[in-house]
Image (tube, rainbow, N blue to C red):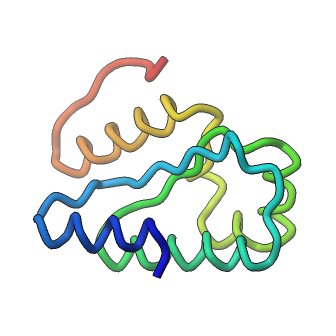
Amino acid sequence: MSECEGILIEAAAHGVLPGTLVIDFEEVFLVDDTGAVAITSLFEYARRYGVDLALARVHSGTHELLKLSGVVDDIGEHRIYDTVRHAVAAATTFTASDAGTATTGSGD
């Protein structure tokens, strides 16, 4: 079990699951096959809990590796953001629109 999976299990036990889990990739420069499988597995695991996954600040080289390994196809390009702020804003907008609440603002 990954650390993120453990966090989701603990959050579920307390009834406070997030709508979206944002992972900051600023310090990630290489993703091998094991890492690619782990990201896809985390995405699938989070979805079982009703939690979406977003990746933020993914370097261009890392993004290319994620494409080559099939991660981008698995999770969707629309879940990759330039900044953590944009990922959180998109998650907030998504969550609010799901709840039928109007949102405003540019997210910047």
* x then y, percent, for residue 21: 41, 54
- The structure residue drawn at horizontal position 44% and vertical position 66%, both measured from the top left corner, is 4
Q: Is residue 15 above or below residue 25?
A: below
Q: Nearer the viewer, residue 94 or 71?
A: 71
Q: Nearer the viewer, residue 102 or 41?
A: 41
* x then y, percent, for residue 102: 21, 32
Q: Is residue 102 above or below residue 18?
A: above
The answer to whether 40 appears left or right of 42 in the picture is right
* x then y, percent, for residue 78: 59, 51
Task: Write down the quadrant of residue 75 in the picture.
Answer: bottom right
The answer to whether 21 appears left or right of 99 in the picture is right
- The structure residue drawn at horizontal position 59% and vertical position 32%, both measured from the top left corner, is 83
Task: Write down the quadrant of residue 59 in the picture.
Answer: top right
The answer to whether 79 appears left or right of 30 in the picture is left
- The structure residue drawn at horizontal position 44% and vertical position 23%, both measured from the top left corner, is 107
Q: Nearer the viewer, residue 41 or 13?
A: 13
